Amino acid sequence: MALNDLATLVVGSGNYLTAPVGTPMPDDLLVPTSPWEPVGHTSLEDVFGITSEGGEATTIGSLQNKTLRTKYSARTETMALTLQQFDKAALKLYFGANAPTLPDGTIGVPADPQPTQAAFLAVFVDGENHFGFYAPKAEIYRADDMAIADTESLAGLPLGVKPMVYGNNTWTYAVTPLGGTVATGATAGTPGSFTPDGSVAPANLAALATVTASPLTAWTSGQYVALGDDSNAYWTGSAWASGTAPGSGA
Amino acid sequence: MAGIPDHIKAIAELSPVEDLLLVVLRKGLPGIRVKSLVDQHETFPLVLVRRDPSFGAWDGDARFTDAARVVINCFAADPNGDEDSAILSEAVRVVLRDAWLNNEVVPGRGHITRVDMNSSPRRASDWATATGPVQYADLPTGVWRYESIYDIRIRKPRKRPYPLPH
């Protein structure tokens, strides 16, 4: 696999959102529109985590082959974040969707709390890159006990988000790869362009190996495409070469 | 030809931290002079940004991030220069924090991924402290200086700051 600097992630900021179960992922993760709603302020220090249960491997062998195959048990995952907002909506995420609003405006903590069911979206931004977790159906409920330990930092409500299978899906949640759409074609020019539109330039000359040149005849003098490592490449008629096309007289 | 050749500049991956902060602070503080050098006949208010050499071990990711300790001096003149320079220092803090949390990307310079205040704004009586400007001995009459120190982490730009010309 080619090295791709553009696919590395350093989270600078992020946001967590919920919407009614089954709400599709927004077209623009950076500008999610209604019915997606932020869950509120969350911790700057404990940003996000995923824990899992299950998934234990059992090795199955025969008399002739002691490690014939491996069988894994089902795995359930929980996304963890710490909510730092104490309004009604946030408190219900922590104490249960069935927490009643009492006549004096307080939130009653139910004896038999029910998790909130919602679609869930986590968006992390790294400059011009962004990365997202999307679950069309998830159960949101407290992940840990709450403790207010000091008077210096924001109090937090540890939340757990358990993605669940929605409808006929064979998956519980989806992630968005960094690095954009992989280029499948390169069109000659000064500089040339990659197809499909909006695809990311291959990282280097080696990564061009799977890209189809257009035209397939040798590119003419000065034509090239710019690669992710800031080098240029052109099509000789039979292979990719580094630099710009020298032309017939070169 | 003056300067270094383009193919040497193209080796550089990180942009000077001061250059990124100058862009961020100038955008966030319209009407305020934001600079990294002091003019011979300076005017105020002024925000002076300088990377602090006394950072200890540099601990960025050698491939993708930079880390810097930055000294920011805020100057304002009377009347009310003392309070004005304190308020200007606070405005600088807010602009830096918002640039971090809003992922403000400066093309060719990168963006801030973390801001921590290392030393909060404090009044300094003259130009020269260990981290402050040392170009002149005394502040001009009626001018006040507040000095603060930030530890800043930076994501390097997607493209090298000085790409080879095609």
Image (cartoon, rainbow, N blue to C red):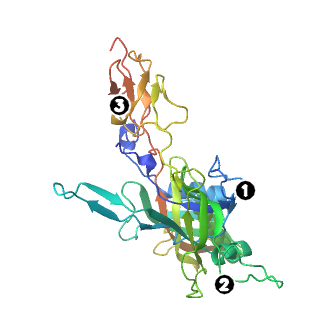
Q: What secondary structure is found at the residue carrying circle 2?
A: loop
Question: Label 1: which residue?
Answer: A35
The chain under label 3 reads A
Question: Number of labelled discs?
Answer: 3
**C-alpha span from label 3 to label 2:** 62 Å
Badge 1 crowding class, 10 Å Cα cut-off, few under 14, some 14 to 19, many 20 or more, is few
Q: Quadrant of residue B52?
A: bottom left
Q: Is residue A236 left or right of residue A223?
A: left
Q: How far from the left and from the top, in percent, is residue B31? A: 70, 58
**First of labels 3, 2 by sequence position:** 2
Q: Quadrant of the C terminus of chain B?
A: top left
Residue shown at 39% from the left, 43% from the top: B9
Residue A60 in the image: state x and y as whole percent. 26, 59
Q: State whether residue B135 appears in this view.
A: no
Which residue type does callout 1 highlight? Pro
Q: Which residue is mark 2?
A: A111
> Residue drawn 40% across and 71% down?
B54
Q: Residue drawn 37% across and 54% down?
A: B63
Query: Of the residues tagged 1 and 3, which is closer to the observer?
Result: 1
